C-alpha cells in the first residue's frame, strides 16, 4: 500500500454508508444498524472507519427509524444524512445520497452499515488499488470455500469482471464460484452518476440493485476490477441475532478494535 498515494487521493473521496434497511430478520423493533456490539451501535464502527479514511466526506443513507439513527450518529459524527423514503434497493439508496456529494469528489466508496468489522486499512487499500489502477469500479471481494448466501462475482473468458449475481438468481454452475461480493465498492463518481440512471427495476417490488452497475460498466467498456480482501471476517454482515452474537464475540476478543 502506497500511503503517499492514499493521502493525495482521499481528499477527493467520499464514503456512502447504507444504513436504511428494515432488518426484519433481527425480529426487533429497533433499527438494525442501532443494535449494539460491545456497547456501541454497529453503525458507529462503520462510521468511525469511514472517518479514518475520508474525515468529513461521509453520507449515511437512512430510512427505517431515520430520525433516531440520525440523532444517535450525530452525537459522535459530522456525517451528512440522506433519506431513502421507500425500501427500493441498494441502487436507489446510493442514488439518494448523490446530491450530498460535493463537486470536488472524484471517487465514492460504498460501505454497508451492517458490516461493522471492516477496517480502515482495508478501505484505504481499496481506494489505493482503485485509483492506482485507474478503474471505474473496484469491488472488494473475497475467496470463500463455502460461499452460500453471498453474491458471486462473474468473470468472462479473459478474466474481466462482467457482473455480480445473487445466490437466489445464480445457476448451479455460478453457485460453484468461490469469489464473492462483499458489498463494498469504490466507484468513479462520474460513472456512478451515469450508471445509476440506467438501472432498471429488478423485481415486482420495483427494487434497484447497485450490483447492476457492474454489467452496465462492462457493456460500456469501463475498467472494472476486484480487490480480494485478506480477512474474511471483515466482510461479515449482520442479518440475524445469531450473526450479532457471532460478531460480538469477535469484537470481545479484540477489545481495542475501533475500526
Image (tube, helix red, strand yellow):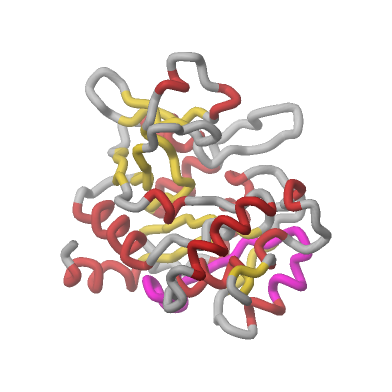
Q: Viewer-proximal residue, 231 or 170?
A: 231
Residue occupying the point 68% across, 67% down: 34
Q: Viewer-proximal residue, 158 or 219?
A: 158
Residue at far bottom of view:
75
Q: Which of the 4 image quadrants contains residue 181?
A: top left
Residue 54 at x, y percent in the picture: 39, 72
**In this rendering, is residue 184 above or below 50?**
above
Residue 48 at x, y percent in the picture: 48, 74
Q: What is the total number of numbered labels drawn onto the structure image? A: 0
Q: Where the N terminus falls, by quadrant?
A: bottom left
Q: Which of the 4 image quadrants contains residue 220?
A: top left
Residue 241 at x, y percent in the picture: 69, 54
Residue occupying the point 76% across, 55% down: 85
Magenta span includes 148: no
Residue 138 lies left or right of residue 241; in this view the side is left
Q: Viewer-proximal residue, 21 or 39?
A: 39
Residue occupying the point 56% across, 81% down: 77
Q: Which of the 4 image quadrants contains residue 8?
A: bottom left
The residues colored magenta run 50-70
Residue at far top of view:
172
Amino acid at each position: 500500500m502506497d500511503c503517499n498515494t492514499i493521502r493525495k487521493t482521499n481528499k477527493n473521496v467520499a464514503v456512502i454508508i447504507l444504513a436504511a434497511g428494515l432488518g426484519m430478520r433481527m425480529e426487533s423493533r429497533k433499527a438494525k444498524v442501532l443494535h449494539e456490539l460491545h456497547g456501541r451501535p454497529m453503525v458507529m464502527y462503520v462510521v468511525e472507519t469511514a472517518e479514518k479514511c475520508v474525515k468529513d466526506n461521509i453520507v449515511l443513507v437512512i430510512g427505517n427509524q431515520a430520525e433516531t439513527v440520525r440523532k444517535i450518529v450525530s452525537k459522535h459524527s459530522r456525517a451528512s444524512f440522506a433519506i431513502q423514503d421507500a425500501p427500493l434497493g441498494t441502487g436507489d439508496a446510493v442514488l439518494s445520497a448523490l446530491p450530498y456529494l460535493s463537486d470536488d469528489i472524484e471517487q465514492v466508496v460504498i460501505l454497508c452499515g451492517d458490516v461493522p468489522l471492516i477496517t480502515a486499512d482495508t478501505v484505504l487499500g481499496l481506494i489505493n488499488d482503485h485509483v492506482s489502477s485507474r478503474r471505474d469500479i473496484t469491488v472488494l471481494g473475497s475467496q470463500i470455500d463455502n460461499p452460500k448466501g453471498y453474491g458471486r462475482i462473474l468473470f468472462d473468458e479473459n478474466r474481466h469482471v462482467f457482473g455480480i449475481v445473487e445466490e437466489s438468481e445464480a445457476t448451479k454452475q455460478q453457485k460453484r464460484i468461490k469469489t464473492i461480493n462483499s458489498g463494498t465498492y469504490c466507484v468513479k463518481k462520474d460513472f456512478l452518476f451515469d450508471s445509476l440512471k440506467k438501472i432498471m427495476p429488478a423485481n415486482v417490488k420495483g427494487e434497484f440493485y447497485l450490483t447492476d452497475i457492474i454489467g452496465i460498466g462492462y457493456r460500456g467498456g469501463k475498467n472494472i476490477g476486484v480487490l480480494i480482501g485478506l480477512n474474511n471476517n471483515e466482510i461479515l454482515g449482520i442479518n440475524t441475532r445469531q450473526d450479532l452474537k457471532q460478531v460480538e464475540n469477535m469484537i470481545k476478543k479484540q477489545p481495542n478494535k475501533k475500526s
